[in-house]
Image: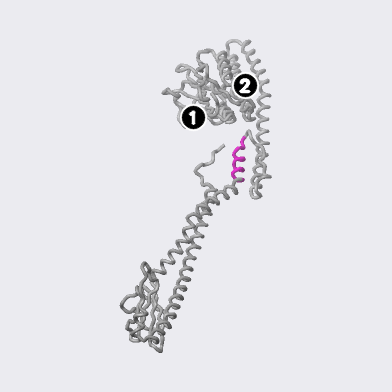
């Protein structure tokens, strides 16, 4: 199975980021537009208040002038400032000549630099409104600082923006929860598809999927059905071929051995020996094909806990009895070391046989014996002497029908079978060269990550 890239962009993350960013941008735009509208409305309100104040002051001032006269009215109309109070509106009362008659406490003591003309006028600091009483020739000019207006707009804008500091993160969390819940069926479908391999080709349940994903699940199920049919046909052919070939090959090998015994020491005997060698290779290939068909059938797991150290002892003992030099194969295992797990003993035996056979066939008997180490932590190591293999050679020999640079006989299927079975057993095969603790050699390491020891 080709692993997916962990660095690939996440659709969920992109959706959450895009929706949150778009929503935040729209909110900021709405608040910005609201601030502009609020500024216009506040200016209209302030202008209206400015005009109302000026027009209401005119009759009051004119009435005082008419009742008390200018000399007595001026002291009465002059305002006093309350302690701690800031005037937001200031005013001046002027006659037709422009002379300053009365002013508010915070108003400048010089006349405003604004014409004596009824209506609005402004400079860099103030917005003015001038009211005029024609019979008396009195002008009332009320001014409002732009700073006061800017402060009101700024406070209003802050009141709009501050909630966004809390609203945007809360909305982001809500969007994250909603998007995760929405795309959860996609993740479920991905995991279902990811779990499919030669040992698991059960159809995906499409009934619980959203309508948009059901065609994908149905297409995958159709593909799985076709692939299962093809693999079943391949397995059946491989298994049947291996079974059917074993008997005639064994018969031909027996006949050849009888022929060799009857022939003298001549060229015919040598040719018969070559036939015997070829038949042995063919028998070995048939055995490997049978193992491959069993590996493809998914026999790696068992429905109960098994102790695999007994399998190690049995396989090593069988090889020591069958090889010419039993001391060429050495087993290292502490008495308390255990390999217990829900694994098929038959599958583990096939794995060990292939790895030990490779070590015996391709290892250099003159340098080091083949050593099998059973270690704590679910580790089994098979080490043999050999020249150092490059990284590319270690990768190449794992492929089916691929063989390293060797003249020894072999089918090129052993490591492929081992890889397949260990994958079903949730174990890993690691190939190392040089071997651990050596400056040469080859090491095949079986690691059961979840195996109790």
Percent x, y of residue 453: 53, 23
Q: Nearer the viewer, residue 440 or 96?
A: 96
Percent x, y of residue 238: 65, 29
Quarter residue 313 falls in: top right
Residues packed near mark 1 inside 10 Å, few (<14), some (14 to 19) or many (20 plus):
some
**What residue is rendered at 52% in x and 52% in y?**
170
The answer to whether the residues at label 2 and label 1 have Cβ atoms under 8 Å apart is no
Residue numbers of the magenta segment: 185-197
Q: Secondary structure at mark 2?
A: helix
Magenta stretch, main secondary structure class: helix
Residues packed near mark 2 inside 10 Å, few (<14), some (14 to 19) or many (20 plus):
many
Please say whether residue 136 is visible from this viewpoint: yes
Residue 394, numbered circle: 1
The residue that disc 2 covers is 283
Height in image: 292 above or below 154?
A: above
Residue 293, numbered circle: none
**What residue is rendered at 54% in x and 31% in y?**
399
Q: Secondary structure at mark 1?
A: helix
Percent x, y of residue 393: 48, 30
Q: Pick the quarter of the image with the N terminus.
A: top right
Quarter residue 352 falls in: top right
* Residue 119 magenta-highlighted: no
Foreground disc of the pair 2, 1: 1
Tell me which numbered mark, 2 or 1, is placed earlier along the sequence: 2
Q: Nearer the viewer, residue 176 or 249?
A: 176
Percent x, y of residue 420: 58, 30
């Amino acid at each position: 199975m080709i692993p997916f890239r962990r660095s690939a962009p996440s659709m969920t993350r992109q959706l959450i980021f895009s929706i949150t960013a778009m929503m935040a941008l729209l909110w900021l735009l709405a608040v910005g537009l609201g601030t502009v509208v609020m500024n216009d409305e506040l200016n209209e309100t302030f202008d209206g208040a400015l005009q109302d104040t000026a027009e209401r002051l005119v009759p009051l001032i004119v009435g005082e002038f008419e009742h008390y006269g200018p000399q007595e009215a001026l002291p009465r109309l002059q305002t006093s400032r309350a302690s701690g109070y800031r005037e937001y509106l200031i005013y001046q009362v002027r006659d037709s000549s422009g002379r300053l008659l009365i002013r508010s406490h915070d108003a400048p003591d010089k006349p405003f630099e604004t014409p004596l003309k009824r209506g609005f006028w402004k400079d860099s600091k103030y917005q003015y409104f001038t009211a005029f009483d024609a019979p008396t020739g009195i002008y009332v000019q009320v001014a409002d600082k732009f700073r006061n207006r800017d402060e009101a707009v700024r406070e209003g804008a802050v009141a709009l923006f501050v909630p966004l500091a809390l609203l945007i993160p809360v909305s982001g969390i809500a969007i994250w929860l909603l998007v995760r819940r929405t795309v959860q069926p996609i993740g479920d479908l991905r995991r279902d598809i990811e779990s499919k391999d030669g040992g698991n080709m059960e159809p995906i349940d499409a009934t619980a999927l959203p309508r948009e994903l059901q065609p994908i699940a149905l297409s995958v199920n159709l593909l799985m059905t076709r692939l299962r049919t093809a693999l079943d046909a391949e397995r059946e052919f491989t298994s049947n071929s291996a079974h059917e070939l074993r008997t005639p090959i064994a018969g031909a090998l027996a006949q050849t051995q009888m022929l060799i015994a009857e022939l003298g020491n001549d060229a015919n005997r040598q040719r018969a020996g070559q036939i015997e060698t070829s038949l042995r290779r063919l028998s070995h290939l048939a055995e490997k094909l049978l193992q491959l068909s069993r590996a493809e059938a998914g026999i790696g797991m068992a429905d109960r806990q098994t102790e695999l150290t007994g399998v190690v002892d049995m396989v090593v003992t069988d090889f020591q009895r069958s090889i010419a030099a039993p001391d060429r194969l050495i087993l290292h295992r502490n008495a308390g070391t255990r390999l217990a797990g829900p694994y098929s003993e038959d599958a583990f035996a096939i794995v060990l046989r292939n790895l030990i056979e490779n070590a015996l066939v391709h290892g250099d008997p003159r340098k080091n014996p083949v050593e099998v180490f059973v270690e704590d932590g679910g580790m089994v190591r098979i080490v043999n002497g050999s020249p150092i293999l490059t990284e590319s050679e270690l990768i190449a020999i794992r492929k089916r029908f691929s063989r390293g640079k060797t003249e020894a006989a072999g089918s090129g299927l052993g490591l492929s079978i081992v890889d397949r079975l260990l994958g079903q057993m949730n174990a890993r095969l690691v190939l190392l060269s040089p071997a651990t603790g050596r400056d040469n050699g080859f090491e095949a390491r079986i690691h059961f990550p979840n195996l109790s020891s």
